[in-house]
Amino acid sequence: SAVISQKPSRDICQRGTSLTIQCQVDSQVTMMFWYRQQPGQSLTLIATANQGSEATYESGFVIDKFPISRPNLTFSTLTVSNMSPEDSSIYLCSVVMDGGFNEKLFFGSGTQLSVL
Amino acid sequence: AQSVAQPEDQVNVAEGNPLTVKCTYSVSGNPYLFWYVQYPNRGLQFLLKYITGDNLVKGSYGFEAEFNKSQTSFHLKKPSALVSDSALYFCAVRATNDYKLSFGAGTTVTVRA
């Protein structure tokens, strides 16, 4: 299995500031994704983190608000920019290893963000 | 577009009784189906998946799920529930050629002693 280190685990931030969340995997992975889980709700995909190129964003999410980097096959960052209380959520990175029947999908432990 | 429905927000059972958490899905082509569990203040933990083969899939902690193509369902089951199974359960689906997952709204399971 993959060991995913996601930092920080939680943070309390002021409105208007930005927070960068890091996701480090202990082995090379095929795909990396960022999800958001708003309070009491399910997970929603924010974007696919593409190595060496711009991330692919889902409907309702834009690069200016959620810039993503993925400089190599084991590391990615998600920045939540110009935060407002509505951004208070758990943010999770997810990785896919292998493929086909042996496909494995793992989630980080999440970053719980509270915006005041 | 793909989607998942978990019709029950909450499921309450007594310890030792069978547990069922329902899930139906919609996706183009053959589905890849997953169940995850989330304990308070913790990340998602993988329980089991269906990709192909036997419709009955066995997973972690004694859980199993049955894929029913005609009913587009993938219900999670455990023959004898434990108090420690109390958690939030998510069903997820993706298409064969796309790694992006769509999650259901989640079902809170409470197992009483």
Image: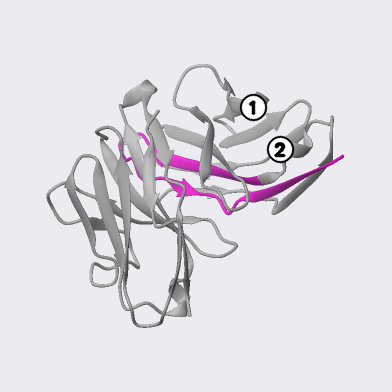
Q: Is the residue marked by circle 1 packed among few (<14), some (14-19), or many (20+) residues within 10 Å? A: few
Residue at screen point 43% across, 48% down: B2
Judging by the rendered image, the residue that carries numbered circle 1 is B61
Task: Find residue B85 and name its label.
Answer: 2
When the figure is inspected, residue A39 is found, relative to residue A56, above or below; the finding is below
Q: Main secondary structure of the magenta part?
A: strand
Q: Are marks 2 and 1 in contact (CB under 8 Å)?
A: yes
Side of B63 where B110 appears, left or right = right
What amino acid is at disc 1?
Tyr
Residue at screen point 53% across, 17% down: B54
Numbered range of the magenta stretch: B88-113
Residue at screen point 31% across, 27% down: A99
What x and y, as percent, mark residue A65?
Answer: 29, 72
Q: Is the residue marked by circle 2 packed among few (<14), some (14-19), or many (20+) residues within 10 Å? A: some
Q: Helix or strand or loop: what does disc 2 sit on?
A: helix
What amino acid is at disc 2?
Asp
Q: A51 and B2: which one is in front?
A: A51
Chain letter for mark 2: B
Does residue B64 appear anywhere in the picture? no
Upstream in sequence: badge 2 or badge 1: 1
